[in-house]
């Protein structure tokens, strides 16, 4: 991968986390993502599922801040993301995915209407509210169902998230 392609992928990863487009990733971006998921599935914030989504979002933020907020200002700039988070994404995307596990687990539960796992349709809705373009959300959600059983499990979403986060450096 050349340097321009690497920069494009890193910019896309940064934009995914920068939910409000402020140019920084901060706690509010994770709270915004949690609120969007709960609203999409009409899950009350004070319910067990709602509280799990917010707790997962907070844990994800704390993990992100811990690896990337170099100056301690409680926000991650694009530069901090590139030098901190992106390096860790590149070096160990599965470990980074583990930071996201509580949030991803809670989001799957919020999208799971019958207790059997999130369907690709429900997962596409999650992807859309988190900023995935409409034309990509459905095909991506379908691809997440690695075993083809019509349900997306925590392990499937974690593996996909790690794959998405694993951006190899140009000279790697």
Image: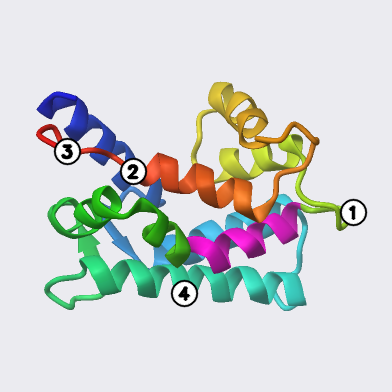
Residue 49 location in percent, x, y?
73, 70
The part of the chain drawn in magenta is 100-111
Is residue 80 shown above or below 136? below
Residue assigned mark 3:
169
In the displayed structure image, the side of residue 66 where residue 121 appears, left or right: right
- Could you tell me how far apart the alpha carbons at marks 1 and 4 are, in whole angstroms? 26 Å
Label number found at residue 43:
none
In the displayed structure image, the side of residue 131 where residue 72 appears, left or right: left
Q: Which residue lies at the image location 25% right of the left edge and 40% below the top edge?
A: 10
Assign a secondary structure to mark 2.
loop
- Could you tell me how far apart the alpha carbons at marks 1 and 3 are, in whole angstroms? 41 Å
Q: Main secondary structure of the magenta part?
A: helix
Where is the C terminus found, in terms of image quarters?
A: top left
Is residue 141 shown above or below 30? above
Foreground tag (1 vs 2): 2
**Viewer-closest of 30 and 170:** 170
In the displayed structure image, the side of residue 55 where residue 151 appears, left or right: right
Residue assigned mark 4:
59
Of the image marks 1 and 2, the number of the one nearer the N terminus: 1
- Could you tell me how far apart the alpha carbons at marks 1 and 2 are, in whole angstroms? 32 Å
Label number found at residue 114:
1
Of the image marks 1 and 4, the number of the one nearer the N terminus: 4
Assign a secondary structure to mark 4.
helix
């Amino acid at each position: 991968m050349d340097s321009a392609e690497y920069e494009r992928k890193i910019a896309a990863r940064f934009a995914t986390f920068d939910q409000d487009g402020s140019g920084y990733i901060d706690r509010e971006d994770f709270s915004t993502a949690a609120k969007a998921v709960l609203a999409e599935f009409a899950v009350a914030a004070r319910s067990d599922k709602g509280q799990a989504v917010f707790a997962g979002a907070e844990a994800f933020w704390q993990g992100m801040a811990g690896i990337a907020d170099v100056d301690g200002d409680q926000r991650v700039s694009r530069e901090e993301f590139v030098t901190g988070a992106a390096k860790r994404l590149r070096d160990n995307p599965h470990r980074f995915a583990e930071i996201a596990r509580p949030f991803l687990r809670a989001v799957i539960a919020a999208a799971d209407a019958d207790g059997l796992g999130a369907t690709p349709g429900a997962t596409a809705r999650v992807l859309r509210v988190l900023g995935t373009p409409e034309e990509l959300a459905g095909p991506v959600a379908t691809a997440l169902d690695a075993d083809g059983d019509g349900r997306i499990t925590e392990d499937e979403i974690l593996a996909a998230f790690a794959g998405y986060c694993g951006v190899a450096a140009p000279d790697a």
